Amino acid sequence: MCSSQTIDPDWAQPDTPASRHSIAVAQHLRGQIEDAGGVLPFDQYMDIALYAPGLGYYATGTRKFGQGGDFVTAPEIGPLFGGCLAHEVGLVLETIDDACLLEFGAGSGALAQSLIEALSADGRLPSRYCILEISPDLRERQRQRLEPLAEHYGLKIEWLEQLPDGPLQGVILANEVVDAFAVTRFRVIEGRPWRAGISIDGDGFAWEWIDDLDPDSGAAKIVQQYELVEGYISEVCPRAEAWIHALGVSLQRGLALVIDYGFPAREYYLPERSQGTLRCHYQHRAHNDPLILPGIQDVTCHVNFSALAEAGRTAGFDVLGYTSQESYLLALGLLDLATPQPDDDEKLMFARAAEVKQLILPSQMGEAFKVMAFGKNIEQVLAGFKLRDRSSSL
């Protein structure tokens, strides 16, 4: 069940370098499983498959974003997403002296570019733009795209490998970041959660279920609270909660915006979601088998926004809003930004119309993606939640 040998024959087959890379990742994983005594916890498997230096999906030079990659993010579609965010972000930045804008996982740099251009047009550039990026390849791609732009606008831009040591004031952005944190997967067996592990199965991998789940993971409480039935499979993400706690320690004053796909807890653990929310992306094909194509497919999990909100409050944040991407972007003037201008040609008008549809239609990104805002020591009401704030659903 290894690598490209088991993918659907209707899918585009990996080329020779990709196949070789996936085999190398699989061999590394087999070694890790053997070192672990035959079963590797799934969160460690996911972490290796995505982030192992020189091997993981996000640690190599293959294209991941856009039409030639495996998936499309909102900033890759066009500049409207970043233009809307710039309105919210700019209003916060101008209230804070020496404000920093920190973006987690900037991908191709598309969001940073659209934000810098829009903030400059409004006269609200931060004192510095920081990008926390763990992928050496993506850091280099971002530099090539953004350094000329930063020089043009006279903006200081820097790349970080970890949160700054000192207190931070400004805005933190995390667009499609939390879904890529390694998760603890569990299955209800004999009325309690058993932890998912990965074992070797011939040339491939197989699921194992281990009765040693950390009581602090929160899974047992979830099983009881939502009355999860025998065989129910789902996930918890302690790493997301630890990440929010780290942000709470770092951010002294300002705003943290988290944009991702997910649900509040009562929707996350619905009976019909009994196989969990793990999703994999390979050349624009979405499926739910993380045990194939290691190292050359993305592995993600939906975000439990209730757990994220609770962790944020514990970390000293105020939850300032929670809503769908559709409501958020419309409240920030998406339709005004997309209004045709006198010198626009027909091709540009059609492209903007298509961009708007993909960003806000419920069948596209509009409802699946949510926006959550955390604040600390700021008093202003955020414009993006004025149409509809779903915080009461958390």
Image: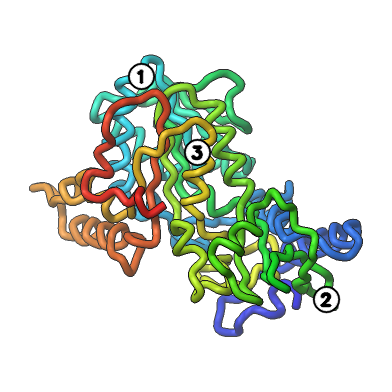
Task: Give the Cα separation between the discs numbered 1 and 3.
Answer: 21 Å
| Mark 2 in CB contact with mark 1 (< 8 angstroms) | no
Q: Is residue 211 left or right of residue 323?
A: right
Question: Is the residue 253 above or below the residue 136 in the image?
Answer: above
- Foreground label between 3 and 2: 3
Pointer 3: residues within 10 angstroms few (<14), some, or many (20+)? many
Q: Amino acid at mark 3?
A: Gly
Does label 1 or label 3 sit earlier along the sequence? 1
Residue denoted by label 3? 312
Q: Is residue 186 left or right of residue 321?
A: right
Residue denoted by label 2? 201
Inspect this view and state whether residue 150 appears: no
Instruction: From the top left corner, tell me how far across and down residue 171 is, in percent.
Output: 41, 30
Does label 2 or label 1 sit earlier along the sequence? 1
Residue denoted by label 1? 96
Question: In the image as oriented, which residue stretches furthest toward the bottom?
Answer: 9
Question: Is the residue 101 above or below the residue 391 in the image?
Answer: above
SS under mark 2 = strand
Pointer 2: residues within 10 angstroms few (<14), some, or many (20+)? few
Image point (74%, 59%), residue name: 45
Q: Amino acid at mark 1?
A: Ile
